[in-house]
Image (cartoon, rainbow, N blue to C red):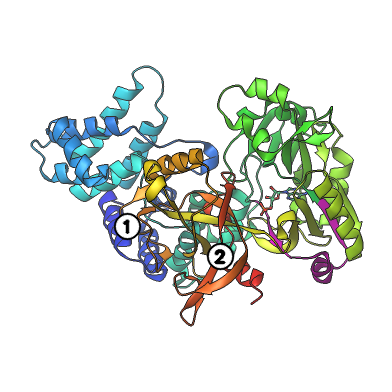
Amino acid sequence: MLFSLAAQRFHEIEKIRGRLEMTDILADLFRMALPNEISDLVYLTKGQLLPPYKGIDLGLGERFAEEAISISTGHPKSNIQSYFKKSGDLGLTAEHFVSERKQQSLSSSELELSYVYDAMLKIATSSGTGSQQLKIRYLSDLLNSATPIEARYIVRFVLGQLRLGVGDPTILDALSVSKTGDKSLRNELENAYNLCSDLGFVAKTFKETPDKIKEFQIEIFKPIRPALAERLKTPEEIIKKLGRCFVEYKYDGFRLMCHKKGKEVEIYSRKLEKMTHMFPDVKKAILSLPHDEIIFEGEALAFNKKEDRFYSFQETMHRRRKHGIKEASLKYPLRVFIFDIQYLDGRNTSILSFKQRREIIEGIFPKGILHTSDGWIVEKPAKLRKIFDDAISKGLEGVMAKDLNSPYVAGKRKFAWVKLKKSYGAQMDTVDAVILGYYKGKGARAIFGFGGLLVGTYNNEKGRFETIAKIGTGFTEQEMEMLREMLDRIKLGHPPHDLDYEIKPDVWVKPLYIVEVAFDEITRSPSHTCGKKEGKGYALRFPRMIRIRDDKGIYDSTTTKEIKRMAGS
Ligand code: AMP
């Protein structure tokens, strides 16, 4: 497949807002791709080179891209920089200068999709001395052969700024439509994706041998997409829903999925990024387990042995810095509270009932760094309330109730797990909302260039984001500066393609970050689009930012469906 075809379709996708249209365009493109091209195409559409757990960083520096544009078009760098300053988009800058190319390279030819993909992979992965020059050369070679529209997407891609707004759900729908003309295979495809977290691999398997999708298997070193919890408001509601169930402490730490095969160990975050280097102590403990093959999950929390208390989430996060991991692991020793097991020595344990999985966990994990989570069988609301109160008095977040008969539900929010959190009292509730844009500060806040956030929820039935609140409070001065800087790096010149909105912020941003938001109640407002019906959407009254949830991805935000349920409708 020629790259120009993909670039043309990307251009069409950028111009439309409807998910259905987007699905059709992608389905058409997927249909045309050969089996050995489809995974490259899927990754490129997502603005990635490989699934996130492979840890490939895009994000070539802008200066290098300017240099490459200059070399390949013959225009001086100063012209390129001033055009970029005006347009704010190096992709458009590349497009402009390629269309006014002063010289045509002799070697230029039509670009194949796989050739572009391979070159981009080389740009992302070259390292060591001389690698910067090499990256510039790879990019200028690509631009030599590129048409203006191809140049736009190549440059945006290598900068890590391809913003098509195509989410995983749309890609899954499009794959199904590409084969059957409808979404009938979407569930099978989604189940396969949930087991391996690699959409490119799912797409390739689907194209080569569609039947294999049905019998997809868990593999070690391919992270499983995490099970998600539903929420209920009281112990009574939980017992009514689950009956006799298992209730564990809900630890407010860092979710880890650990994989081990022989002498190799990998640790993945909830967002499925490889985090092994940050947890040398946990890795050592996993290596000493008497099992050759294992996949399990737990919540890591810094623990103060002397005072018998947990450190806060912020203190636990000290190790997220690149340096000082060793020091942090001595100062804030971790415990990982193991709450699930998906695989053990050749056996897929994720299909067993929770009760059976719990028995396995209790039989394996010692009470050292790897610690079986605290939990009890519960039949009555009073006992659940007692465990909840104990958890709160120990400084924990609340409890997780689990359906004893349910298998592990990868990647889905089902009533297999139900959370009951401390903040769910009458006074304060929280949701995890996606940042969609920000307001520039007025008055005293003008110096920070930041006055508040526009945030939203994800409507997973429609595959679109919807706004729910304008947050003006809860920020420290430091946070305002940090947020402005952070959001400026992902600003968009237009609203995100997969957003329904009525009100506009001063600056739109790419949906990338989640914030935890407290509020007083859920009301209805014509200004917001969350679950909009009869002209009114759901809105948060008196929203306050609590913290950035950088352990969560955008599709982990609170869904519109959850908001409806929280509002009691
Ligand atoms: P939330 O982030 O509020 O949606 O709650 C779900 C998260 O709670 C999971 O992703 C885990 O990181 C965390 N968690 C803490 N303790 C447990 C537990 N015992 N079982 C399952 N998840 C837990």
Q: Label 2 belongs to which residue? A: 540
Disc 1 versus disc 2: nearer the observer: 2
Magenta stretch contains residue 559? no
Q: Secondary structure at mark 1?
A: loop
The amino acid pointed to by label 2 is Leu
Q: Secondary structure at mark 2?
A: strand
Q: Label 1 belongs to which residue? A: 494
Query: Residue 475 vs residue 41: left or right?
Result: right
Q: Residue at x 74, y 49 (%)?
A: 397
Report the number of numbered marks.
2
Q: Residues within 10 Å of mark 1 (few under 14, many from 20)?
A: few
Quick check: can you spot residue 304? yes
Question: Residue 514: horizontal and vertical position, in percent?
Answer: 54, 51
Examine the image and state in which quarter residue 317 appears: top right
Quick check: can you spot residue 440? no
Question: Residue 221: horizontal and vertical position, in percent?
Answer: 63, 39
Q: Residue at x 51, y 55 (%)?
A: 434
Name the residue nearer the viewer: 95 or 490: 490
Magenta stretch: give its range: 226-248
Name the residue nearer the viewer: 450 or 241: 450
Ligand 1 within 8 Å of disc 1? The answer is no
Asked whether the residues under the numbered discs 1 and 2 touch, taking CB atoms below 8 Å apart as contact, a structural biologist would say: no
Q: Residue furthest bottom?
A: 534
